[in-house]
Amino acid sequence: MDKSSEKEFLVKFGQNLRRLRKQKGYTQEELANELDIEISQISRIERGVINTSVSLVKSIVDCLQVKANELFD
Amino acid sequence: MDKSSEKEFLVKFGQNLRRLRKQKGYTQEELANELDIEISQISRIERGVINTSVSLVKSIVDCLQVKANELFD
DNA sequence: TTATATATAGGCACATATGCCTATTTTTAA
DNA sequence: TTAAAAATAGGCATATGTGCCTATATATAA
């Protein structure tokens, strides 16, 4: 995966997260508190700035009660 | 997610990857070549040693033609 | 508009992932 | 059992993620 495709994916991933988070009625701050991470991290992930870890994704899908697919597709 | 639960998850995640990789008939080296990463990284992920990134997971699911769910569940 | 809530931006220190490398161990096939 | 293939182990330098912090910007509601 080249750099620009990776960036594209990360932006898409972040958009998916934002959509799902809002669907579940969470603010970034609320989700961050649930996950026990910084709100700035949620912001960075949703904007596609960073390439976060699989364990955090696991925490997110458990918290939002969604399928991992919904974030990756 | 506490440290020990995270470790459990990473081990499970790695076992899932290993199972799917073998089902598709890849060696670690072949998969590493396809993904253009080091074989040592595949080994570390499959053993649950490291907490890899979402973009690599995306590359993996595309390469193996599996659903992200199959790695996370 | 004004006030409040929500999200973005960025710096800094530290932790962890990754690439690159060599060596060793384990598994598989002959 | 031996040879070859596959996987593991670990060191080191560098890149990137994360926590913690403050400040700014944008969106929402009164």
Image (spheres, coloured by chain):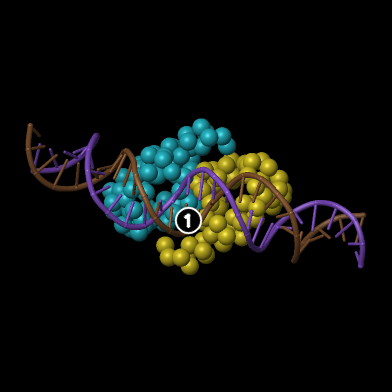
Chain colours: A yellow, B cyan, C purple, D brown
Percent position (x, y) of residue D11?
A: 34, 44
Percent position (x, y) of residue A54?
A: 50, 46
Tag 1: Cα neighbours inside 10 Å, few (<14), some, or many (≥20)? many
- Residue drawn 43% across the image and 65% down it: A2
Q: Nearer the viewer, residue B67 or A36?
A: A36
In this view of the protein, can residue A40 be seen by the observer?
A: yes
Q: Nearer the viewer, residue B68 or C1?
A: C1
Q: B63 left or right of A23?
A: left
Q: Is residue C20 above or below residue B45?
A: below
Q: Nearer the viewer, residue B72 or A30?
A: A30
In this view of the protein, can residue B26 be seen by the observer?
A: no
Percent position (x, y) of residue A5?
A: 47, 65
- Specify the quadrant that holds the N terminus of chain A: bottom left
Q: Nearer the viewer, residue C16 or A25?
A: C16
Q: A39 left or right of A51?
A: right
**The quadrant where residue C6 appears:** bottom right
How many numbered tags mark residues here?
Answer: 1
Q: B35 left or right of A29?
A: left
Chain ID for label 1?
Answer: B
Tell me the element at label 1: helix
**The quadrant where residue A43 appears:** bottom right
- Residue drawn 55% across the image and 57% down it: A50
**The quadrant where residue A12 appears:** bottom right
- At label 1, which amino acid type do we have? Ser
Q: B39 left or right of C4?
A: left
Percent position (x, y) of residue A27?
A: 72, 50
- Residue drawn 36% across the image and 56% down it: B37
- Residue drawn 49% across the image and 52% down it: B54
Instruction: Return the residue at label 1.
Output: B55
Q: Is residue B18 above or below residue B30?
A: above
